[in-house]
Amino acid sequence: MQTYRTSAQWQQLFQQRSHFSGTNVEFCEHHNVSITTYYKQRTLLTEGLPKTPLPTQTPRPTASRFVQVKQTTEISAQTHQNNIHFDTRTGQLTLPVDLATTDIVAIVKGLAV
């Protein structure tokens, strides 16, 4: 059985929540409210409220407004292989490394059919 609550009843329920020591799920079970309905109603009630502005940070007079960035370059050694090996259901497939990616994709798709 569904229980319909007015906006004032939801506000009262949310005030009760602030004094409840359990989780939102436990609170909803205690008051026979669906957790999704709880979150939906909480969102609907807070949409009409004026948003409180975020506190502004005042920069420290000695702090720089620049961010230090350090750029590094990583070089890795690659071993050169002449072939790419695929193990398929019917055997092994060996393709040259310099074969175009689109060709490799087409071959693999053809094997999957």
Image (cartoon, rainbow, N blue to C red):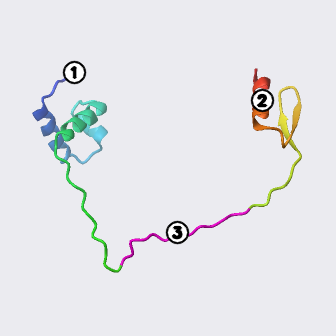
Among the 4 quarters of the image, the one containing residue 56:
bottom left
Describe the element under mark 3 as helix, strand or loop.
loop
User: In the image, which residues are magenta?
Assistant: 63-75
The mark closer to the camera, 1 or 2, is: 2
The mark closer to the camera, 3 or 1, is: 3
- The outermost residue toward the left is 8
Residue carrying label 2: 108
Among the 4 quarters of the image, the one containing residue 47:
top left
Identify the disc placed on residue 69.
3
Across and down, in percent, residue 105 comes to 75, 32
The mark that comes first in sequence, 3 or 2, is 3
Closer to the camera, 80 or 28? 80
Residue at the image position 24 percent from the left and 38 percent from the top? 43
Residue at the image position 79 percent from the left and 32 percent from the top? 103
Residue carrying label 1: 2
Residue kind at label 3, given as amino acid type: Val
Number of numbered tags placed on the structure image:
3
Question: Magenta segment: does it hold 71?
Answer: yes
Q: Distance between the Cα atoms at labels 3 and 1?
A: 58 Å
Describe the element under mark 2 as helix, strand or loop.
helix
Closer to the camera, 89 or 94? 94
